[in-house]
């Protein structure tokens, strides 16, 4: 697997993959900003399909936590069932079969559990991890904030969905740009991030190694 250069965190469609983690029915009433998180993840999925970025989808213990919510728009993607609090053990064969893979774009639930552990496992494999901050949440906003800081300390990149989308497309002359522009022209729903980041939160300052 190609070693990641984590200094700049550039991403390209041909060496990236989108991970969609555990956006399931039973989480709907308990996760803060659940509809907004799923909406942003759905936006990432639409763009991934347009740019031929591979997508992997997991469900945590679906017998108890239910299926992936339909509004994610992931119909046609086979969900991979797991019990581990990381996507990586279940998806290891998929990762091993992609020697050109460099970057993983990570969306889903919960930030302090499966998102954090997935990020650490991917970083340990030498991959760049880009956490889509407006497409990840938790029951507790404290857990969400501290987990984001923890991932940043470990070398993950924190980015918004729009920043990543435009980094993938790179150029307004791209043949799919008009379709992507139609996706991103709608304002991203508020997922509570402003409250986490405002006031130069010390947990998110100078936390990269």
Image: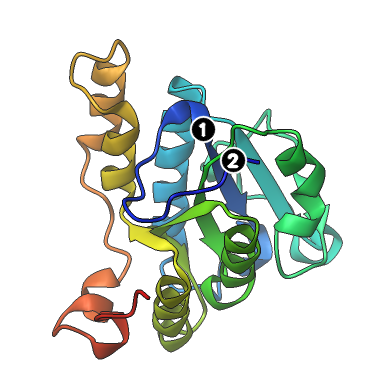
Would you identify the image quadrant in which residue 179 lies?
Answer: top left
- Residue sitting nearer the eye, 6 or 77: 6
User: How far across and down, in percent of the image, does residue 199 sit?
Assistant: 13, 85
User: How far across and down, in percent of the image, does residue 151 sit?
Assistant: 47, 72
Q: Left or right? Give the position of 101 relative to 13.
A: right
Q: Left or right? Give the position of 118 relative to 106.
A: right
At 21% from the left and 23% from the top, the residue drawn is: 171
Number of other residues with Cα within 10 Å of mark 2, as a class: few under 14, some 14 to 19, many 20 or more: some
User: How far across and down, in percent of the image, does residue 164 sit?
Assistant: 33, 43
Element marked by disc 1: helix
At 31% from the left and 86% from the top, the residue drawn is: 203
User: How far across and down, in percent of the image, does residue 16 sit?
Assistant: 51, 37
Query: Looking at the image, is 10 positioned above or below residue 128?
Result: above
Would you identify the image quadrant in which residue 62 lies?
Answer: bottom right
Element marked by disc 2: loop
- Label 1 – label 2 distance at C-alpha: 9 Å
Q: Left or right? Give the position of 82 relative to 143.
A: right
Q: Are marks 1 and 2 in contact (CB under 8 Å)?
A: yes
Which mark is first along the chain, 2 or 1? Answer: 2
Circle on res. 76: none
At 44% from the left and 63% from the top, the residue drawn is: 156
Number of other residues with Cα within 10 Å of mark 1, as a class: few under 14, some 14 to 19, many 20 or more: some
- Residue sitting nearer the eye, 107 or 29: 107
> Which mark is nearer the camera, 1 or 2?
2
At 56% from the left and 51% from the top, the residue drawn is: 127
Q: Which corner quadrant holds the N terminus? A: top right
> To which residue does mark 1 refer?
15
> To which residue does mark 2 refer?
2
Query: Looking at the image, is 123 positioned above or below residue 149?
Result: above
Q: Which corner quadrant holds the C terminus? A: bottom left
Residue at the right extreme, as displayed: 63
């Amino acid at each position: 697997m190609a070693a990641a250069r984590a200094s700049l965190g550039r991403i390209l469609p041909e060496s990236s993959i989108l991970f969609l983690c555990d956006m399931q029915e039973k989480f709907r009433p308990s996760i803060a900003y659940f509809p907004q998180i799923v909406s942003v993840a759905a936006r990432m999925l639409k763009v991934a399909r347009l740019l031929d970025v591979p997508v992997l989808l997991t469900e945590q213990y679906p017998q108890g936590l239910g299926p992936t919510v339909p509004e994610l728009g992931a119909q046609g993607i086979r969900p991979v069932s797991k019990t581990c609090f990381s996507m990586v053990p279940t998806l290891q064969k998929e990762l091993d079969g992609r020697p050109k893979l460099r970057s993983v774009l990570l969306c889903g639930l919960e930030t302090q559990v499966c998102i954090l552990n997935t990020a650490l496992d991917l970083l340990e494999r030498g991959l760049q991890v880009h956490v889509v901050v407006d497409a990840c949440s938790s029951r507790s906003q404290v857990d969400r904030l501290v987990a984001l800081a923890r991932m940043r300390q470990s070398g993950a990149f924190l980015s918004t969905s729009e920043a990543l989308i435009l980094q993938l497309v790179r150029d307004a002359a791209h043949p799919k740009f008009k379709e992507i522009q139609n996706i991103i022209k709608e304002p991203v729903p508020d997922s509570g991030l402003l409250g986490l980041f405002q006031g130069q939160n010390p947990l998110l300052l100078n936390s990269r190694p």
